[in-house]
Amino acid sequence: MSYQAPLRDMQFVLYELLNGDQILPALPGCEDATREIMDAMLTEGAKLAENVMAPLNTSGDREGCQYDPETKSVKTPTGFKEAYKQFSENGWTALAAPVEYGGQGLPHTLNTLAEEMVCSANLSLGMYPGLTHGAVNALISYGSDELKETYLPKLISGEWSGTMCLTEPHCGTDLGLIRTKADPQADGSYAVSGTKIWITGGEQDLTDNIIHLVLAKLPDAPGGSKGISLFIVPKFLTDGTRNTAFCGGLEHKMGIKGSATCVMNFEGAKGWLVGEPHKGLQAMFVMMNSARLMVGLQGLGIAEAAYQTSLGFAKDRRQSRSLAGPQEPDQSADCIIVHPDVRRMLLRQKATIEGGRALAYFTSLQLDVAHKAESAEEREQADDMVQLLTPIVKAFLTDEGFFCANDGLQLMGGNGFTQDWPIEQYVRDSRITRIYEGTNGIQALDLVGRKLGHAGGRAVKRFFAMLEQYGKDNPDAPHLDDVKGAVARLQKATMWLMQNGMTDREQAGAAATPYLRLFALTAVAYFWSRMALTAQHALNEGSTEVDFYQAKLHTAHFYMAKLLPQTESLLTEIEAGKDSLMEITVAQL
């Protein structure tokens, strides 16, 4: 079956659960984000995703990108250029960008909903405009007025695209080791020289220009990450001259084959400093945090597409009889959706997708509040939530995106393993999301090493206070005891980290990944309780969408009964400490 945007589920979370149609229009500058406008945007976005982008997903995977070593150019798969043009001309690249530079000025939350649909429909194609959003955010935050006026209008219109050039052949996460250099020139520019790898969209035929944001070191740079500066290096200069920034080849990848992943060679390329010298990492983190939220949505988007495919298969494929007796006696066999283990795989997908969607949309809504709320206190509280939840959104949703795609393939058996169905591509495409923009292990270290202790633990205290207040305000909420139990385990794990991880970094490192998952499962349990409460209210008020709301109640029950109990074993794993990991010698491994 072909992808169908889950508009009703998206509207349920945005409007009924999070009250986005009330919160967003009340923010300064977001008055146009009415429910009518948001519904129209969702409807048009769904049409573009379903009818333009999704049909190119399989063909783009089979064809891939083609590199010409003579011209050092890259050709994207057939149809990508036309689809990208339609995407940008219809205003999707400008959706949440500032009006003064040609954007529509709509909330980031709407961009999140659009990104989910794009990632479900065609992850490879969606990668090209995706990183441009991050480049725009970095320039808005740190670019000079001249750089903003030169580059933002065409980046926002989609005529130009942006890249993020961090990784080098000898270093990835440890950016303090980069060797790319930037030498000051008499005209105020810099000559940037070095090689960057794994650059998404580093070269392509979709846009007229490509604007690279490049991390490099000045001649007087101090050692380590404190000596990194950020530079803007365009493919073409403003006078039309070709800059000396060339693609040296394409990576041969397991998935996302329609996305050009390039080796980029900067050969004294002309660039300009973004922000202050030696403070480029701070500026780049603006782009990276935007990208991490986007990658979380990639996991969510692929999970949804995989679920739709495997659900359609399970409703149609006949195999054996139900263990409770024939469900369709007049047929040769029952459809496999009657089998408990098939239900387990489907409900695991459904529960994590819908819970993950609530977590992602909540985080995006907090991002809008953090940027636009009138009171400083409101902005600080919202920003605390964004900082705390960003690594969780990135890691949990991409883990689950891969697990859901894998469950979908398993459910479909040998059919799933063939190219006759799109599910094997979803498995391959989703695997990278757990690696790029900081591996999920790095996200876990960021959570325990930076976010928990930030401002004296202010963010995590506010998170716990939010959940406690929910229980006080809704003492009869569905599954409240389950949520309270998970919160107690998360608090116990947090205290263990405070007591052990502060004095022994290896203890924190050993606990980081299970702690992030424990945190995510607890947060999603909170949202499932809220979704069940919202659904129960709708049914009590006589809604005619009985199946829709009852499905929420049933799925919440499954989540609490079958998935949330993982928090018990995760706490046990955390409290077991590092010894079983670190006592074995390297020679014994």
Image (spheres, rainbow, N blue to C red):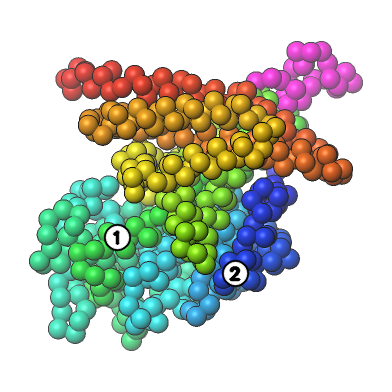
Q: Position of residue 587 (x, y in %)?
A: 16, 20
Query: Which corner quadrant of the image does residue 87 belong to?
Result: bottom right
Q: Residue at x 79, y 20 (%)?
A: 333
Q: Residue at x 15, y 67 (%)?
A: 218
Which type of secondary structure does the marked residue at label 1 adopt?
A: helix
Residue where numbered disc 1 is placed = 282
Residue where numbered disc 2 is placed = 30
Whether 518 is drawn above or below 194: the answer is above
The chief SS type of the magenta part is loop
The kind of residue on which mark 1 rests is Gln
Q: Residue furthest right?
A: 330
Q: Position of residue 93 (x, y in %)?
A: 53, 68
Q: Residue at x 47, y 49 (%)?
A: 385
Count the labels in the image.
2
- Magenta highlight on residue 339: yes
Q: Residue furthest bottom?
A: 239
Does residue 121 show up?
no
Q: Position of residue 291 (x, y in %)?
A: 43, 55
What is the span of residues highlighted in magenta in the rendered image?
Answer: 318-341
Does residue 495 show up?
yes
Q: Are marks 1 and 2 in contact (CB under 8 Å)?
A: no
- Magenta highlight on residue 57: no
530 lies left or right of 433: right
Whether 197 is drawn above or below 191: the answer is above
112 lies left or right of 261: right
Query: Which corner quadrant of the image does residue 586 belong to?
Result: top left
